[in-house]
Amino acid sequence: MRKFVNLDTKSKKIIKNFLVFFGMVFGMIVVLIIFSLSARNSWRAGLAVEIQNVLDSYPYGQYTVGTNLPVNSTLSTSSAVYELIKKDDRKNEKYYGVIVRIPSMLGPLPAVFIYSENNGVFFAGYAVDNGKASATVGKRISSGILKYWENMVPKIVANTGAE
């Protein structure tokens, strides 16, 4: 134990450099964690706005995006669930808006689905303006992928504990 107490100046300098380096790495990790945690609320608000934009153009009902429901599964990295309020709904049925990143011919795109326990799942649209490629990303081309995600949406909502 006495060997470590009486270090020469070269060893002390090396240890000091290592401590400074690892201190800087630890500090950068802490800063990244703080920024990612503080950006979480603005990210959720931005997703709610994107879902609302899609729902405003959805012809089969008027919905308003409500609160975010946390997804408790590995799908939380590529999906988000929000409560929806349907205008003029006298049944007090619960509606959910799910935005999920699905594969397409143009790469992954954010698709918005509407889900209710009684009415099932409906594809509302993509939360992105595809411009000239809108016809390419149509529902008819990727019907198999949309069908898969329509089957997955109830499972995603169930992982929020909402039902």
Image: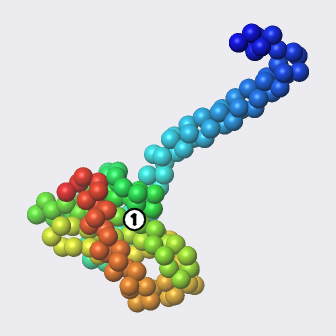
| Viewer can see residue 56 | no
Q: Which residue is mark 1?
A: 99
**Mark 1 residue type:** Ile
Please tell me in which quadrant of the rendered image residue 90 appears: bottom left
Residue 68 at x, y = what percent? 34, 52
Above or below residue 85? Residue 19 is above
Q: In front: 56, or 3?
A: 3
Left or right of 5 in this view: 46? left
- Residue 150 falls in which quadrant of the image? bottom left
Quadrant (top left, top right, bottom left, bottom right) of the N terminus: top right
**Nearer to us in this view, 162 or 155:** 155
Q: Quadrant of residue 79?
A: bottom left
Camera-side residue of 25 and 16: 16
- Rendered location of residue 25, percent (x, y): 69, 36
Residue 104 seen in render: yes
The residue sitting at 19% across, 60% down in the picture is 94
Residue 14 image point, x, y percent = 83, 26
Q: Looking at the picture, how far across and down is residue 88, in whole percent?
A: 18, 65
Q: Quadrant of the C terminus?
A: bottom left
